[in-house]
C-alpha cells in the first residue's frame, strides 16, 4: 500500500477510534478506566514520541540543508533577491488572508447574540515591536539559537556559513562536502520517520478526538464554519491565483504533491514539526531546488501563517460583536498589521495563534478575556489552519524557485502517489 494512503488510513482510524472513545465518556473526568489507560499510556505516549522525533530533526535539517543550499547558489542566484521576493510574498499573502477574513466575518456576523457570561481573565504578553522583531533575527550565540530552536536566528547563521563557504575557496569546498554528507544522512532519517507516520498520526488523532469530540463545534457552529470557509477559500482561490499568475502551473498539482506535508500538518498542528516533511515535499515532489527550498520552507514555518491570520481576523470580529463593540477602520488596519507582524516572530507550534491573538486584541483595545469564548474549538481549528500555513509555504517556494529558474517543472507536473 502507498504511504500516503496508509497515513490517510491512520488518520481516519484515529478520528473514528477517538470519537467512539469520546462517546463512551472519554472526555469526562471520571471516564472509564480502560479508556483513560489506553489514551494516556498508549496514544499519548506514541503520539508524543512521534512529534518529538520530528522536532529532533528540525534544527539539524534546517541548518545543514540551508548551509548546502546557500553555498550551492553560486553566482547566478542573488541571495538578497530571493529573500526579498520570499518575504514580500509571505507578507502579502498573510495580509491578504487577514483582510479577507475581516471582510467575510463582517458579512457573516458570527459573534452577534453570543453570551459573554463570566470568563476568567487572561495574562497577555505585549506584541513585539518591529524593532524587536528585527533585532531578534540576529543571533549572538549560534548554539543558543539552536538549543532554543530560534528559527530566524538559525536561518541567518546558516546563510552566513553558506556564503562564507563560497568565499573560502578550497577549504570552503571541503566543509561543504561534509555538510552535504550530513544533510543526506539527516534526510535518510526523515524518510525513516515518515514511514512510521501512519502509527504516529493514528495515536495523535485518537487522543485528540477522545478529549475533544464535536460538542464544542455545535455551540460555535457559525464561528467554526466561517473560519473553515475562509481557510478553504484562501488555499483554493488565493493560492491557486498567485501560483498561476506567476508560473502558469496547474495549482491542482501543487495540492496533490503537497499532500504528505498537509497530512502531517493536520496531525501535528505544528508547521515547525512539519518542516522536515514540507522540505522533502518541496524538493522531491514540487521540484524546487534545495538552494531555494532550504531557505523558503523554514522561513515560511515561522513567518508565514496565513491560516492563523485568518483565525485571528475572524476571532477579532467575533469577540467585538459578542461584547457589542464597533471596530473603526483604523482598528481594522491595526488588526491586519499586528496579525501580520505577530506571525513573524512566533514559531509554528500548536496553539501559538491564540497567544498572538491576545496581542492583536490588546492592540485594538478589545477584551482579551474574549478568547475564553473561542478556546473550546481552537484545538480543532489549529489542525486546519496549520494545513493552510504550510500549503502557503509550498506555494511561495514554487513561485520563488520558478522565478529563479530553479524549478523542475517535469517533477512538479508529475503526480506522485
Ligand atoms: N499551529 C499553527 C502552526 O504551527 C500556529 C497556530 O495557528 O497556532 O502553524
Image (cartoon, rainbow, N blue to C red):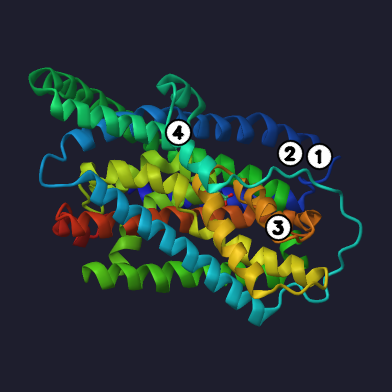
Point out residue 148 in the picture as x, y percentages from the top left corner. Answer: 51, 26
Q: Tell me the distance, in whole angstroms, between the alpha carbons under discs 2 and 4.
A: 27 Å
Instruction: Identify the residue position indicated by label 3 in the image.
Output: 361
Give the structural element (helix, strand or loop) at label 1.
loop
> Mark 2 or mark 3: which comes first in sequence?
2
**Mark 3 vs ligand 1: CB under 8 Å?**
no
Q: Which numbered tag is attached to residue 32?
A: 1
Q: Residue furthest right?
A: 118
Left or right of 228: which side holds 389? Answer: left
Looking at marks 1 and 3 on the same chain, the residue that comes earlier in the sequence is marked by: 1
Disc 1: CA contacts within 10 A as few (<14), some (14-19) or many (>=20): some
22 left or right, relative to 384: right
Nearer the observer, disc 4 or disc 1? 4
How far apart marks 4 and 3 lie (CA) works out to 33 Å
- Residue depicted at 30% across the width and 67% down the height: 243
Q: Earlier in the sequence, mark 4 or mark 1?
A: 1
Q: Nearer the viewer, residue 280 or 152?
A: 152
Q: Is residue 224 visible?
A: no
Q: Position of residue 139 (x, y in %)?
A: 43, 28
Check disc 2 and report the residue beneath it.
35
What residue is pinned by disc 4? 54
- Tell me the number on the disc at residue 163: none
List the single residue furthest toward the front: 131
Residue 88 or residue 112, whichever sits in front? 88
- Category of crowding for the residue at label 2, using alpha-carbon neighbours closer than 10 angstroms: few (below 14), some (14–19), many (at least 20): some
Amino acid at each position: 500500500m502507498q504511504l500516503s494512503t496508509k497515513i490517510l488510513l491512520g488518520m481516519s482510524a484515529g478520528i473514528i477510534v477517538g470519537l467512539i472513545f469520546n462517546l463512551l465518556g472519554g472526555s469526562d473526568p471520571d471516564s472509564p478506566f480502560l479508556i483513560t489507560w489506553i489514551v494516556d499510556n498508549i496514544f499519548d505516549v506514541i503520539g508524543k514520541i512521534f512529534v518529538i522525533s520530528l522536532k529532533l530533526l528540525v534544527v539539524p535539517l534546517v541548518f545543514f540543508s540551508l548551509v548546502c543550499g546557500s553555498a550551492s547558489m553560486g553566482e547566478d542566484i542573488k541571495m538578497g533577491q530571493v529573500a526579498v521576493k520570499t518575504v514580500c510574498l509571505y507578507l502579502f499573502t498573510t495580509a491578504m488572508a487577514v483582510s479577507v477574513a475581516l471582510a467575510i466575518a463582517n458579512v457573516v456576523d458570527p459573534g452577534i447574540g453570543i453570551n459573554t457570561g463570566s470568563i476568567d481573565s487572561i495574562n497577555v504578553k505585549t506584541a513585539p515591536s518591529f524593532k524587536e522583531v528585527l533585532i531578534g533575527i540576529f543571533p549572538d550565540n549560534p548554539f543558543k539559537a539552536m538549543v532554543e530552536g530560534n528559527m530566524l536566528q538559525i536561518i541567518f547563521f546558516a546563510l552566513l556559513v553558506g556564503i562564507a563557504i563560497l568565499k573560502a575557496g578550497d577549504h570552503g569546498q571541503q566543509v561543504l562536502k561534509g555538510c552535504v554528507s550530513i544533510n543526506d544522512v539527516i534526510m535518510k532519517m526523515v524518510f525513516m520517520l515518515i514511514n512510521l507516520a501512519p502509527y504516529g498520526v493514528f495515536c495523535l488523532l485518537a487522543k485528540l478526538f477522545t478529549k475533544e469530540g464535536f460538542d464544542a463545534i455545535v455551540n460555535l457552529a457559525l464561528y467554526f464554519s466561517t473560519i473553515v470557509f475562509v481557510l478553504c477559500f484562501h488555499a483554493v482561490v488565493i493560492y491557486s491565483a498567485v501560483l498561476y499568475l506567476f508560473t502558469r502551473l496547474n495549482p491542482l498539482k501543487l495540492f496533490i504533491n503537497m499532500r504528505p506535508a498537509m497530512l502531517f500538518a493536520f496531525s501535528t498542528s505544528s508547521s515547525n514539526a512539519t518542516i522536515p516533511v514540507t522540505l522533502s515535499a518541496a524538493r522531491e515532489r514540487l521540484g524546487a531546488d534545495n538552494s531555494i527550498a532550504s531557505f523558503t520552507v523554514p522561513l515560511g514555518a515561522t513567518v508565514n501563517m496565513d491560516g492563523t491570520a485568518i483565525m485571528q481576523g475572524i476571532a477579532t470580529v467575533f469577540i467585538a460583536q459578542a461584547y457589542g463593540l464597533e471596530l473603526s477602520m483604523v482598528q481594522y488596519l491595526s488588526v491586519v498589521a499586528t496579525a501580520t507582524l505577530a506571525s513573524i516572530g512566533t514559531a509554528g507550534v500548536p496553539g501559538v495563534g491564540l497567544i498572538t491573538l491576545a496581542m492583536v486584541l490588546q492592540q485594538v483595545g478589545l477584551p482579551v478575556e474574549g478568547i475564553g469564548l473561542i478556546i473550546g474549538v481552537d484545538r480543532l481549528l489549529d489542525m486546519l489552519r496549520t494545513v493552510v500555513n504550510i500549503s502557503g509555504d509550498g506555494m511561495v517556494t514554487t513561485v520563488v524557485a520558478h522565478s529563479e529558474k530553479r524549478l523542475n517543472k517535469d517533477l512538479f507536473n508529475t503526480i506522485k502517489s
